[in-house]
Amino acid sequence: MARRRDRARGAYRSYRAQAAERSGVNTLRGEWRKLPGPVRTFTPIVILLGIAIAYPFYLSSLPTGNVPLIYSFPSVRSAVTILVFTTMAVGLNVVVGYCGLLDLGYVAFYAIGAYTAGWLASGQFQQVNFHFGSVGVSRDARGIHISIWLVLIIAALLTAYGGVLIGLPTLRLRGDYLAIVTLGFGEIIPQFVRNADSLHGFDLTHGTFGISPIDSPGFGNRLHTSLGLPAAYSQEFTADRLFFWTALVLLLVTIFCCIRLRDSRLGRAWIAIREDETAAGAMGIPLMRTKTWAYAIGAFFGGAAGAFIASFNAGAFPSQFSFNISVFLLCMVILGGMGSIWGVVVAGVILSWLNVEGLANIGTWLNDNIFPQSHQIEVAKYQFGIYGIIIVLMMMFRPQGLIPEARRKREIEEGTRGALDEPLYEMRGADEPGAGERGAGGPIPRG
Amino acid sequence: MWTAYNLVHSPATFFTIFLIGLQQGSVYALVALGYTLVYGILQLINFAHGDVFALTGLFASSLITNHFHLSETSSVISIVFGLLAVFLIAMAFGAIIDAGIEFVAYRRLRNAPRLAVLITAVGMSFIVQNISLVFFDVNFRSIPPLISEGDVFSIGGVGLNWQTLFVVAVTVPVLLILSWLVKSTRQGKAMRATAQDPEASAMMGINVNRTISFTFLLAGGLAGIGAVLFLVQFNIRYDTGFELGLIAFTAAVLGGIGNLYGAVLGALIIGMIQAMNEGPFLWAPGSDWTRSIVFGILIAILVFRPEGLLGERTPEGG
């Protein structure tokens, strides 16, 4: 019934589009449509990319101090954080968006990545003196100093391995239970790094003080003199810009990998599991292995991003890894539209901007321009309340996200029987096999 | 093993810790019941519940110190009646907030995907926490020691202090009343029916929405009592509720979520574990590790016995 109505609605839409084109209102749009597919796909991406890459150059010429609503544009330093968090959101999107596994403990991967960087590229382990391709560090400095580029990959692999270890025992669980277990890991790992400063007298994580300083990336003196590449970012005058471009590359690589993965055999298997786990299993998809891959790959990007931001902040501190971060990343995925890469990127940039400086800026602007001197508000104080309101309103009025993926949208409209889409009322016994075979969940009569 | 060793090693310490565990477990039980009631009927983890607990606790603290002006020097009668009034008001407050959250946020999402409701619960948790922050600021709130920490009596070096007695004396009747309410009243029957099959109960003429509201009222009321009991023993802050809520939820899962007796049993076990871990036992890891241990238990339970100790199949403890 509902499906027939939707089809009718779709036909009406396309009829309207044709009418608009015939009437010549959208000549420009028509011309645009005639361009070859790749051009249409890549033109906006290239333009956006150009704007993004050049950001550090034209930032200084942008107005600051009294831009309407946003007050001023984010500094390059904030932009790095924004990009890194967006990268993490894209990584989380693999787990939540593609595979439909609710993960409330993604911060654990962030922590593992950051601490791997701390262990492998700082003076944490004074007992040893191991250097491998590190830049900007004195040869005599004690501790393990491995080139950050390698550390990024090692951290990502190690975190992926951590994801597999967490995933293997827990991925049998469905829905809520999986969410709670991941939440548990997300709480245990930060507490572990907070407390592991004397494991039988061995200082693994340096407790609440965290590991600092962590080496910064760079290309070494030889490439610096021959090609002019930066030797070590932290020693350069324009360190923030270099970090910005590196973060941008990291994000682009992540996006590219995620798009390619989505269209791969594995990605299609993920989406099948998201839509209907029982049916996917019946069609011969190995459920455990596929889900574990989703976990490992989501963790991989989280770990790389964590290691990078640790290097950028030159430290890893346990206070960075709170439950709020997990929720915050999840919000980016939900707001953007689960499974929709561009949606997640947009939501990630907006939300992390709000988190880094946006809310404070908006508050300043409101205080300067709207509210009288006597009634100033302290927006920072309401920060989490504002997130809460955004989340709740979004769930009520646009549960499919800002830029929903077409396929995901159809799933919501048609009410597929995936783990995430079962309506509240149909859930009893959803943890037993065969729970998906219950009757269609129509609206419950009220009263 | 370890517990038994400590029992033999110093029995007095063991029983003292047992009482502390009982005291902590009682508060967890009241909060855990709120989770389990709601989960039983809606299959929803009401993340905001812990924050409702904290908000109610903060509200009760201001009630005690600013409105009733109770202090340790007040007469016994005024303390007894004052606390009674605080209990009633806190119950009503918690109940209204919890049911209000359901009315504002969850009710509209009755047929929405499960994830949407879960995320909304997280959002509501943030909102309630922020409300606490705005009204009560970031500082810890405490009340004067109305219930003395002195011993009622002591046997062989193990003292039963007034606080433990008070907490247990409040919790036990509340649990009995709850059990009666769910088992023997018409409304309780409606709750159990809705938990089993909302569609069929709607067909049988049960007002499903009203029953769900009633469940939230009940959960909020229990959280209110728990909050006052918590306040008698500890300080409270706007974010106290989140962590306590997670621990209470663990307790509910441990006992078998949806199962009322399970929630109480789980809460007592978690309370004991926490007391033993933080107490002066030999080789106790200490309070730094409490959360890790509690969540480790949670993970182990979910992986090896997801239905909990007493099983989840019995809706609403029926």
Image (spheres, coloured by chain):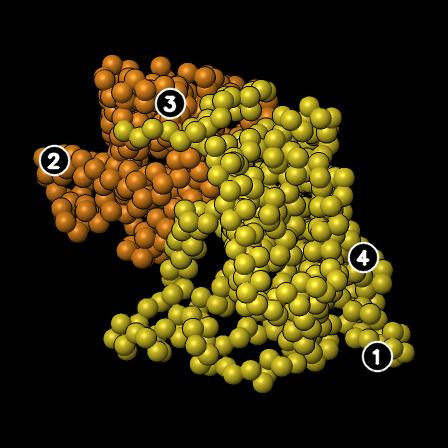
Chain colours: A yellow, B orange
The residue type indicated by label 3 comes to Glu
Return the disc, 3 or 2, that comes first in the chain's sequence. Answer: 2
Residue B299 percent location from the top left of the image: 57, 31
Q: Residue at x 42, y 35 (%)?
A: B111
Residue under pointer 3: B199
Residue under pointer 1: A228
For the residues carrying marks 4 and 2, which lies nearer the camera in this image? 4
Residue under pointer 2: B81
Distance between mark 3 and mark 4 Cα atoms: 57 Å
Quick check: A343 left or right of B18? right
- Above or below, A56 against B161 in this view is below
> Mark 4, chain letter?
A
Q: Residue at x 77, y 72 (%)?
A: A232
Residue B22 percent location from the top left of the image: 37, 26
Residue B279 percent location from the top left of the image: 46, 33
> Mark 3, chain letter?
B
Distance between mark 4 and mark 1 Cα atoms: 21 Å
The residue type indicated by label 4 comes to Leu
The reply to whether discs 4 and 1 touch (Cβ–Cβ < 8 Å) is: no
